[in-house]
Amino acid sequence: MKNNRPVNLDLRTIRLPVSAVASIIHRITGVGLFVALAFLMWALNLSLSSEAGFEKVVSAMNHPLAKLVTWGIVSFFAYHLIAGIKHLFMDIGYFEEKESGALASKFVLIASVICILLLGVWVW
């Protein structure tokens, strides 16, 4: 049996719909939050162990790299939260059509960028 389907192996030429991009980013932020959970639990454990441990965490969090990591974690959380709310609306029957789903995905992306920039101002 001969297969005449076109094969496109150049991933740069594939155009995903905005709803697919929003969904993929939602999954990536979920994995990022899972990985960040180890860091957050370590910092919480150290800060609650003693007063010296708390001071150690506070001094570490003042480092620019730690602020960047913190901004990344809260950015992952913000995007995941906003996209998760959109998914909850989809579960009850809204934004399921192609046009409304694309519009909701654009809203998620724009609202997330605004939220991430505001969180950046807060962290820095």
Image: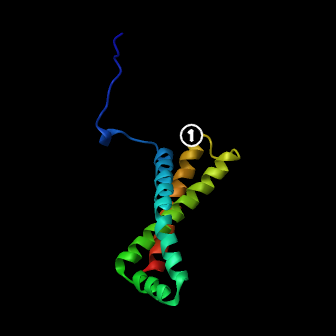
Residue that lies at the very extreme toward the top in this rendered image: 1
- Asked whether the viewer can see residue 60, the reply is yes
Q: In this view, does 37 lie above or below 120?
A: above
What residue is disc 1 on? 98
The residue at the point 46 percent across, 53 percent down is: 28
- Asked whether the viewer can see residue 94, the reply is no
Q: Where is residue 124 in the image (x, y as percent from the top left)?
A: 42, 80
Front residue (pair 27, 6):
27
Q: Helix or strand or loop: what does disc 1 sit on? A: helix
Q: Where is residue 119 in the image (x, y as percent from the top left)?
A: 49, 73
Front residue (pair 69, 7):
69
Front residue (pair 51, 10):
51
**On-image quarter of the N terminus:** top left
Residue that lies at the very extreme toward the right in this rendered image: 92
Q: In this view, does 72 lie above or below 28?
A: below
Q: Where is residue 86 in the image (x, y as percent from the top left)?
A: 61, 53
Residue that lies at the very extreme toward the left in this rendered image: 10
Q: How is the image coloured?
A: rainbow
For residue 8, side relative to residue 122 (left or right): left
Q: Is residue 8 above or below residue 44?
A: above
The residue at the point 57 percent across, 45 percent down is: 101
For residue 32, side relative to residue 3 (left or right): right
For residue 18, side relative to residue 63 (left or right): right
Crowd band around label 1 with a 10 angstrom C-alpha radius: few (<14), some (14–19), many (20+): few
The residue at the point 50 percent across, 86 percent down is: 54
Number of marks in the image?
1
The residue at the point 54 percent across, 59 percent down is: 80
Residue type indicated by callout 1: Lys
